[in-house]
Image (cartoon, rainbow, N blue to C red):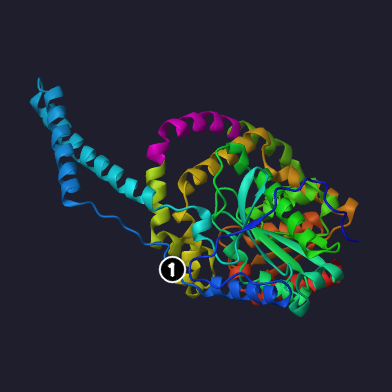
């Protein structure tokens, strides 16, 4: 039986991303709007992300390079003068201070150019992107199936209603593009409305100032807010299905356990949920609570103090093309599928204002949340109880060659939850990206049978 509608208050109405100059006018009502959205999705998937300067490398002018050398000379001279009573020590200090000062000035100047190149999220969004306020955050999200009902458009969708409304939570480091290969197909084969959002700290979602906005709990509520808005737009009373990958699987499971009345089905894809045995749960929970509380108390003030220095290596890594090829190659079983379109869609977030600060805030938020609520082991019995009491089924999908979250964990989790498990051979951590057709078939078949 489908879940009751959520009682959460709706956020302000969503808005579309501004259309780039020269792009076709927005689609009209009915079939024109449906065809326009389909064209926008196709263009967004095929576009090479032109104009985003993903490989931007600023260069210093001759005068600026001379300034970095002068800064090094001045620092070396100052260090030598400071230790002039011991010439050898003074020479050593000068040799250390001079290059450090030169590199520091050079880094400062280059970072200033990088900051100037950053843009507002709406400026780098796709034609089918939408933005709305959910959970106190301006969220970037995408939809499929909301009003894409052919000649009848939204009016027909509202009259007939949608049988399912699926919302997708992505994993760490990803964004809505992670679902781009499966959302349109699921919307088509199921007659469903699908939505996905960028979690706070990732993608094109605006980076808020509050650390609390970056918790998985808030990310879950943001997703439910988007789902509520999109389901209302679709019309009828669709059965709401939560779908989460990796970290997003943990988030979706938390929401299913917290709001079981709003969940008609739960799909966990390579979920980052530890399937601990009952005997060790209490001890591990106590140890985790103490460890995370100590870590947060130590890390948080140090991070505030050292943030400018901590962000430098983070920026260097994320700006590196090789970093993304290596990271995604590790996540995929077939590294030949890691192409430039995939990599660039993952890299897009680094063009957005405060992307680096948001990433650091996200990490701090996890430490803080873990210190307050130690360990996800408690989630498994809570989720099992919620599923049993409210009657929603659970499906776990996993890649047999997953090197990030081993498939053995999902086997143990499926036993603990007494739910269905499908393991894809020759697949890594990203089944929805690596094997989209098999993913769609598995989810659609399960929904038709169980939900």
Residue 41 shows in the view: yes
Residue 381 located left or right of residue 244: right
Q: Does the magenta stretch include residue 354?
A: no
Q: Which residue is drawn at 91% across and 61% down?
A: 1
Q: In this view, does 237 lie to the left or right of 187?
A: right
Residue 196 x %, y %: 66, 60
Magenta segment: does it hold 301? yes
Name the residue rendered at 58%, 67% in the picture.
401
* Position in image of residue 57 (x %, y %): 31, 57
Which element type, helix, strand or loop, lies under badge 1? loop
Magenta stretch bounds: 292-310
Question: Residue 316 placed where, x, y %?
Answer: 37, 51
Residue at the top extreme, as displayed: 85
Give the residue drawn at x 46%, y 67%.
49
Q: Quadrant of residue 156?
A: bottom right
Which image quarter: residue 218?
top right
Q: In this view, does 305 lie above or below 124?
A: above
Q: Nearer the viewer, residue 318 or 409?
A: 318
- Single out the residue that lies furthest toward the bottom: 151
Up/down of 433 relative to 17, above or below = below
Q: Residues within 10 Å of mark 1 (few under 14, many from 20)?
A: few
Which image quadrant: the C terminus?
bottom right
Residue that mark 1 sits on: 50
Secondary structure, magenta segment, majority class: helix
Q: Position of residue 86 (x, y in %)?
A: 10, 22
């Amino acid at each position: 039986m489908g879940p009751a509608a959520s009682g959460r208050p709706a956020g302000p109405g969503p808005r579309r991303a501004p259309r780039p100059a020269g792009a076709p006018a927005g689609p009209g009502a009915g079939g024109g709007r449906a065809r326009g959205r389909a064209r926008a999705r196709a263009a967004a998937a095929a576009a090479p992300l032109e104009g985003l300067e993903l490989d931007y490398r600023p260069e210093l002018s001759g005068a600026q390079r001379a300034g970095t050398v002068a800064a090094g000379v001045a620092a070396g001279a100052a260090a030598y003068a400071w230790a002039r009573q011991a010439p050898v020590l003074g020479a050593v200090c000068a040799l250390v201070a001079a290059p450090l000062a030169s590199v520091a000035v050079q880094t400062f100047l280059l970072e200033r150019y990088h900051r100037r190149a950053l843009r507002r999220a709406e400026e780098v969004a796709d034609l089918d992107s939408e933005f709305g306020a959910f959970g106190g955050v301006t969220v970037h999200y995408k939809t499929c199936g909301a009003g894409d009902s052919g000649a009848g458009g939204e009016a027909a969708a509202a009259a007939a209603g949608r049988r399912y409304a699926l919302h997708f939570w992505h994993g760490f480091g990803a964004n809505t593009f992670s679902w781009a290969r499966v959302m349109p197909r699921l919307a088509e084969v199921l007659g469903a409305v699908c939505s996905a959002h960028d979690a706070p700290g990732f993608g094109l979602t605006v980076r808020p100032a509050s650390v609390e906005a970056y918790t998985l709990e808030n990310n879950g509520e943001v997703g439910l807010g988007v789902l509520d808005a999109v389901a209302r737009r679709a019309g009828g009373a669709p059965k709401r299905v939560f779908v989460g990958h990796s970290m997003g699987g943990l988030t979706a499971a938390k929401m299913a356990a917290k709001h079981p009345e709003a969940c008609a089905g739960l799909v966990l894809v390579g979920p980052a949920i530890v399937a601990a045995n009952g005997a060790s749960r209490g001890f591990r929970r106590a140890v985790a609570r103490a460890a995370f509380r100590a870590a947060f108390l130590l890390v948080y003030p140090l991070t505030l103090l050292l943030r400018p220095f901590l962000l430098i290596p983070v920026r260097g890594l994320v700006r590196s093309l090789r970093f993304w090829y290596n990271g995604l190659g590790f996540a995929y079983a077939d590294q030949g599928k890691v192409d430039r379109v995939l990599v660039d869609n993952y890299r897009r977030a680094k063009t957005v204002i405060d992307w680096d600060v948001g990433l650091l805030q996200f990490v701090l938020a996890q430490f803080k949340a873990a210190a307050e609520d130690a360990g996800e082991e408690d989630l498994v019995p809570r989720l099992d109880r919620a599923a049993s009491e409210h009657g929603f089924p659970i499906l776990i999908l996993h890649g047999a060659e997953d090197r990030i979250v081993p498939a053995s964990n999902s086997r143990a989790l499926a036993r603990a939850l007494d739910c269905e498990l499908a393991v894809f051979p020759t697949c890594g951590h990203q089944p929805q990206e690596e094997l989209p057709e098999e993913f769609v078939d598995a989810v659609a078949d399960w929904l038709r049978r169980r939900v």
